[in-house]
Image: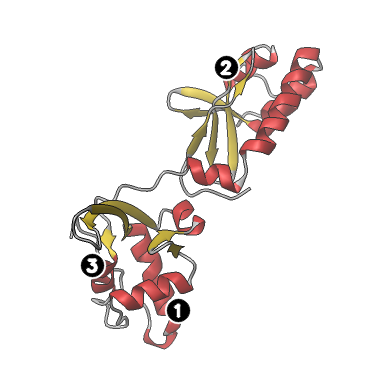
Amino acid sequence: MAELAQTRKLIPRWIGHGDLTIVVEGARVYGRADQVEQLAGIAPWSGGETLLGDTWAREIDGHVFYELDDAIARCEAAGTSRAGEFLTWIRETLEQLLTDEVLDLAQRSPAFIGSYPIRIAAARLSEDPAVHIGQQGLFAHLERIGWIERAGTDWTMTATSRRNGWLTIREVTIPAANRTHRRTYPQLHVTPTGLTELAATLHALHPEQGPERPPHPQLFD
């Protein structure tokens, strides 16, 4: 499973039984506790219980969550037919849900506010005396390090830059080639986190010059 930089929420439905809210934080996967207990038919896990230790609880959006590995272990310990049916369902569901393709679809892009179009990002990076790069050079560098790829005639983010929150997209409307219509294209923006990471990748090309402090992000162009 790919590790996500941002928290993602998935809500699969066990037909005839109910929904289970699953939260993915980095490499950890959680299931909402009250829903696990209802679906599996197990009693609520009291705070004093130490079957799997005292660190199981995790509050997310006002609800208590189990790490799913702990929830599965608790259902196995229950040993009931209903808990067994839940285990069969959750294992099949996780196998289907926690794929790179599904997580990519669940991964929302960061807001473009506070991020930079490629031209502005190149100018910000070039404020560092150790970095000299223009718009086209930055596009080439982004492709070389695997952050962007072609989608028809436009550039788009790769799964790597999307998962890490390094790039985002702003939909921009421009005149079409025949000038009688307009078209929308995805304008790439570099996030503040991405700008810091880019500065590091560019310094790695010239280690003898030493890194400077990354440029401070500002709003808009």
Viewer can see residue 52 = no
Q: Position of residue 72 (x, y in %)?
A: 72, 28
Choose between 177 and 21: the one closer to the eye.
177
Picture residue at 46% right of the left edge, 45% below the top: 6
Quote the CA–CA distance across marks 1 and 3: 21 Å
For the residues carrying marks 3 and 2, which lies nearer the camera in this image? 3
- Give the percent coordinates (x, y) of residue 134: 28, 78
In the picture of the structure, the residue carrying the numbered disc 1 is: 204
Give the number of marks. Answer: 3
Q: Residue 102 falls in which quadrant of the image? A: top right
- Residue shown at 66%/35% (left/top)? 94
Residue type (three-letter) at the residue carrying disc 2: Asp
Badge 3 element: helix
**Disc number at residue 163?**
none
Whether residue 152 is situated above or below residue 173 in the rendered picture: below
Residue at the spot 29% in from the left edge and 82% down from the top edge: 132
* Residue 120 image position (x, y, % from top left): 23, 67
**Above or below — where is 101 with respect to 215?**
above
SS assignment at label 2: helix
Neighbours of disc 1 within 10 Å: few (<14), some (14-19), many (20+): few
Left or right? Give the position of 221 relative to 206: left
Whole-Å distance between the Cαs marked 3 and 2? 48 Å
Residue designated by label 2: 34
Q: Position of residue 46 (x, y in %)?
A: 62, 16
User: Which badge, 1 or 2, comes first in the chain's sequence?
Assistant: 2
Query: What number is the disc on residue 120?
Result: 3
Q: Residues within 10 Å of mark 3 (few under 14, many from 20)?
A: some
Q: Looking at the image, which is closer to me, 213 or 218?
A: 218
